[in-house]
Amino acid sequence: MSQDQDHTQSTAHLSEQTNTTQSQEGSAPQGASFEQTLGQLQEVVQRLNQADLPLDEALEIYDLGVQLARHGRTLLSRAEQRVSHLRGALGGGDEPSP
C-alpha cells in the first residue's frame, strides 16, 4: 500500500470514528464517553507526530483534535460539577476527606 493510501485510510478512520459521535452541527463529538474521546485524541496526536503527513491532511486532523479536546473538556467540567454537587449534598463542602 502506498503512503498516500495509508494517510487517506488513517484520516478516514479517525474521521469515521468521530463522525459516528458528532452532533448534527458537526462541531463537536456528542455522545462519546470521555475514554472514547481521549483514545481518539491520542490517535490524533500520534498521527500529527508523523513527519510525512501532508499539510492539508495535518490541518484536517488538527481540526479534529481541537473538536475532541473541547468535547473532553466539556465532559471533565460536567464531572467536576457533579462531584461538587455530590460533595455539597453530603455536607462535604470543599474539605478533602481524611
Image (cartoon, rainbow, N blue to C red):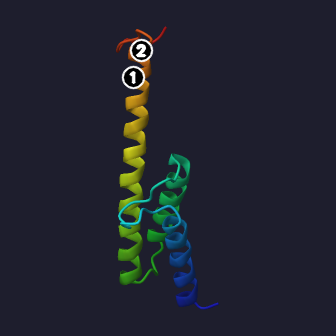
Pick the front one: 40 or 32: 32
Q: Residue at x 37, y 38 (%)?
A: 77
| 10 relative position to 79: left or right | right
Q: Is residue 97 above or below residue 26?
A: above
Residue 90: quarter of image: top left
Q: Position of residue 40 (x, y in %)?
A: 52, 60
The disc label shown at residue 27, or none: none
Tag 2: residue type? Ala
Q: Residue at x 40, y 9 (%)?
A: 91
The disc label shown at residue 85, or none: 1
Disc 1 to disc 2, C-alpha distance = 6 Å
Q: Which quadrant is the N terminus positioned in?
A: bottom right
| 92 relative position to 33: left or right | left
Q: Position of residue 63 (x, y in %)?
A: 35, 68
Q: Is residue 77 above or below residue 54?
A: above
Mark 1 touches mark 2? (CB < 8 Å): yes
Q: Residue furthest right?
A: 1
Helix, strand or loop at label 1? It is: helix
Q: Which residue is mark 2?
A: 89
Q: Residue at x 45, y 63 (%)?
A: 22
Q: Position of residue 16 (x, y in %)?
A: 54, 72
Helix, strand or loop at label 2? It is: helix
Tag 1: residue type? His
**How many numbered badges does the structure rendering display?**
2
Q: Position of residue 67 (x, y in %)?
A: 37, 61
